[in-house]
Image: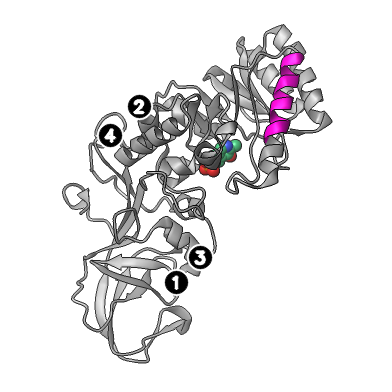
Amino acid sequence: MSPTTAVGPVLPAWAEVDLDALAHNVGVLRDRAPGADLMAVVKADAYGHGLVPVARTAVAAGAAWLGVAQLAEAVALRDAGLTAPVLSWLSVPGSDFAGAVRRDVDLSASAPWALDEIAAAARAEGRTARVHLKVDSGLGRGGAYGQDWTALVRHARPLEAEGVVRVVGVWTHFAFADAPDHPTVLAQQERFFEAAAEAEREGCRPEVRHLANSAATLVHPAAHADLVRPGLALYGLSPVPQVDDDFGLRPVMTLRARLALVKGLPAGQGVSYGHAYVTPGDTVVGLVPAGYGDGVPRNATNVGPVLVGDHRTTVAGRVCMDQFVVDLGPDSTARAGDVVTLFGGAPGEPTAQQWADATGTISYEIVTRIGPRVPRVVIGSHAGSDAGSDAGSPAGEVPAP
Ligand SMILES: *Cc1c(COP(=O)(O)O)cnc(C)c1O
């Protein structure tokens, strides 16, 4: 079932990362946006899946670009030897822009201070910084809004003339891409193309205009522009779960554990802290060694779906820091050591979306919050090559927790 017993230590809990599924999903997304290049968004440790193996596999599968939020994530990609264009889009004043310019990392600017700091770094490095100007087309988050956009573009032009900055991209981000009929989608798109045209009128010559996240890549072709920026869908999860279509995506992460204990409890026994669950009859319970210290949401108490063998059950009682309990029913033949699946993609397995629905969040958060105590075990034919795990271990080998 898992490669974890073949080599390496037996683990209490682990996340299998299926790099073949990831490569497949890159193909699905490229097919949806045939006229655009694809930037694989690998921020936040590739949504919890493992930055470097995911990035390598995505590039091997045809992603021309990589996208991250923080500079340190871009540096980690370069340090791992990835040479594809990388865009880092979220920095604060005083960031190490010189380190980014030296490593050929593309930078986003939403305000003049960012252009000034990037230009200073480029002068110090004796290089030209590659910059993507970000317009706030209506998300009300990052980007230059309204007249600030004109000012940002005009601030960039002399720096381009000096040769320290080159505006290689113009970009924005949607507020409601997951609601394809929402009127803001069209309004943001119009504002974006108008802003891009203004930048060109002012003399900028961007290589790429980009605005589509996963949802827009899948359901909003008019927003594909030159480059699409999917994140969630790469990992096989739907950004539009209300739409009855999985787009042929395959979930990449499967979170598993082994039962640490199986025992009988009598009817009426409270289970776990606060006795939030009480056994309805004599039963058998199993102890699952994963808790909120591993990223299992505490509010999965009494609602998180779990598969034990072919028996579908639910978290029984509070999720604790390191563990939770499942009620296996009176006739269970489960034994300590049996494999438990919290979520995955195979038939019968609960999904990250079901965990999100049960806990009042989105699937993004379910996978991204799986913590560093849970080893990522890469599987699939991409796993053994230089797409292998962060630790550089061979296929299926379990890095030490
Ligand atoms: C996270 C992020 C994406 C990817 O979003 P998904 O909904 O996961 O596809 C794209 N662009 C920006 C700016 C982001 O922050």
Cα–Cα gap, marks 1 and 2 = 39 Å
Q: Is residue 322 above or below residue 43?
A: below
For the record, the magenta segment spans 189-201
Residue type, label 4: His
Q: Residues within 10 Å of mark 4 (few under 14, many from 20)?
A: many
Q: Which residue is mark 3?
A: 359
Q: Which residue is mark 4?
A: 382
SS category of the residue bearing label 1: loop
Whether pointer 3 and pointer 1 mark residues with C-beta atoms closer than 8 Å, the reply is yes
Magenta residues: mostly which secondary structure?
helix
SS category of the residue bearing label 4: loop
SS category of the residue bearing label 2: helix
Q: Which residue is mark 1?
A: 303
What residue do we see at 40% from left, 23% from top?
81
Q: Is residue 185 above or below residue 125?
A: below
Q: Quadrant of the N terminus?
A: bottom left
